[in-house]
Image (tube, rainbow, N blue to C red):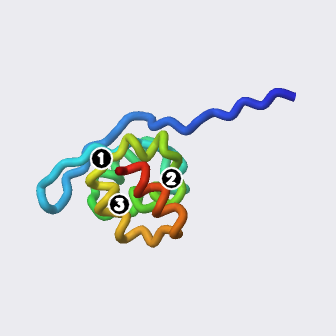
Amino acid sequence: MWRADRFVEPEGEVICTLPSGRRIALPLAPGILKHPTVEDLRRLLTEPAVARKYTIAALHKAPWSVLRKFPRRWLEECMAEAELSARRAAALAFLLS
């Protein structure tokens, strides 16, 4: 039997303004946060606290095809709070370097 897996691809992006005034573009990838739909994510990710939670969840479970769409500096900022396993942190540090 032939099985073809579909790779996760973001379905657009949303702009979030951080408290510092910096604007970041986040990819909309359904499944990083369990329950929100893509339309819900469009609204939710404009809030900096939700954007940070979403990014930390992505660092834990999203494949590189999604993570590479995030702003590199933003990923590096969120990695400190993510409490990743040593292997995942090393792999992401390598990919971000």
- Pair 3/2: label in front: 2
List the residue tagged with mark 3.
Answer: 50
The local secondary structure at tag 3 comes to helix
Residue located at (50% from left, 52% from top): 32
Disc nearer the start of the sequence (3/2): 2
Q: CA distance from mark 1 to mark 2?
A: 16 Å
Residue located at (38% from left, 34% from top): 12
Residue 83: horizontal and vertical position, in percent?
Answer: 45, 72
Q: Residues within 10 Å of mark 2 (few under 14, many from 20)?
A: some
- Pair 1/2: label in front: 1
Q: CA distance from mark 3 to mark 2?
A: 12 Å
Looking at the image, residue 1 lies above or below residue 88: above
Residue located at (32% from left, 59% from top): 76
The local secondary structure at tag 2 comes to loop
Residue 92: horizontal and vertical position, in percent?
Answer: 44, 55
Disc nearer the start of the sequence (3/1): 3
Residue located at (51% from left, 50% from top): 62
Q: Which mark is residue 71?
A: 1
**Amino acid under label 1?**
Pro
Looking at the image, residue 94 lies above or below residue 10: below
Closer to the camera in the image, 50 or 8: 8
The image quadrant that residue 69 belongs to is top left
Disc nearer the start of the sequence (1/2): 2
Q: Is residue 75 left or right of residue 66?
A: left
